[in-house]
Amino acid sequence: MLEETAEKIVKLQVKYPRIVLMIILFVTLLLIPGILKVKIEPSLEKVLPEDLPVIKTMNDMRSQFGADMVYIVLEPDYAADVREPKILKYIDALQQKLIKDENILEVSSIASIVKEKIGFIPDSKRKIEAVLNEDPRTFKLTNRDYSLTFLQLRTDTGTNAALIKKLKFDIKDDIASLEEINPGLNAHVTGFNIIDKATFDIMIFDFSFETPLAFVFIGMIVFIVFRSLVKGFIPMTVVMISMIWTTGLIGYFGIVLSSTNIVAAAMIMGLGIDFGIHILYRFYELKTKNSRENALVHSLRESMRALVAAALTTIAAFLSLLSSPLPAIQNFGIVLSIGIASALIAAVGALPAIIFLYDTHAHKNLRLAKS
């Protein structure tokens, strides 16, 4: 059954190669807009199911109190005591700016402790020391030798990537606006949601670098195998088609990508290239004793059962991830399954036509060169 289907598919592609490739191109163009619809979720928290008790509790805390804490660590770039009046006045000015941000609910600092006690920031360091030494909250906002302090911000950003990004930008903008009165303090912004976003930014950067790198490495190996740049590129078309189709379908289906499944691209490329290599290598092996058409028919006919079996078993393995309680892992399985299915369709439905057109063209050029 599979062998007969393979034979019919190849004969159709040999008879109408350009029409087949136009159909593949048309489908590809239809799926390209879906790429723009792909949603990426940077929050590691979203990897967990929402009905998990700890997640429910955290969401309740956020809705009632704003439970996301952000810290601005202030460290003098010289040997200094953070209880100096000029430092506390700078912290107070920064705090007044920060509290105006709509996503910041509360700001705590050693400056707020002093103002709470006496209503203003005095010019006397001794007076500041006396106030802070009496308040137990001081050592929750400074280290023991008073060489470092931080502002504690209670924020309301949840796991919203856009709000976290805006909050970080606004904080840095507020710090920059007070550069003229900064008494030599280095500011560092941190917090679990900020780290979450920074981790994802690094992963996005790695993805944008590693995916093309994987494509280059695969291309180099295929080039070495076939000893031809053009022949090596032929099976790479399977990878390119499958990547575009997979990404487009992800966007149209509304599958959300996260940090746990963003590595799927390299896996799809690594698994999908096998289909193209098997068909192309077998074609050139059979072509020594057969016509171009027969070589194509026999190459896919002989490989069809193995290709389908390999694809289905791989898809079955990935679909088993749907049993995971983690939504991100479930999406990972779906993305990989779509990728492998797309690679199989591209290899069976487009590659023979590409091989036929290339080999026909190469043969014509060879005859012209000899004549």
Image (tube, rainbow, N blue to C red):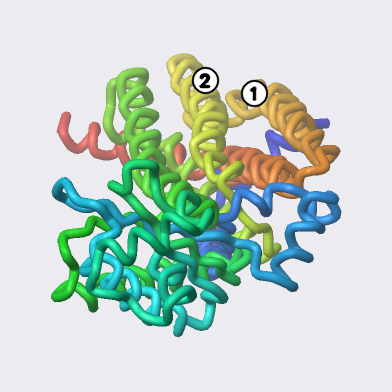
Q: Point out residue 232 in the picture as x, y percentages from the top left corner.
A: 35, 30
Up the image or down, 203 lies above or below 128; here it is above
* Amino acid under disc 1: Ser
For the point 77% across and 36% down, which residue is it? 321
The answer to whether any part of residue 133 appears in the image is yes
For the point 46% across and 49% down, which residue is it? 139
Residue under numbered circle 1: 303
Q: Quadrant of the C terminus?
A: top left
> Few, some or many C-alpha atoms within 10 Å of disc 1 (few <14, some 14-19, many ≥20)?
some
The answer to whether marks 2 and 1 mark residues whose Cβ atoms lie closer than 8 Å is: yes
Up the image or down, 12 lies above or below 189; here it is above
* Residue placed most toward the observer, 120 or 30: 120
On the picture, is 131 further left or further right than 257?
A: left
For the point 46% across and 39% down, which residue is it? 356
Find numbered disc 1 in the image and state the secondary structure of the residue it sits on.
helix
Q: Quadrant of the N terminus?
A: top right
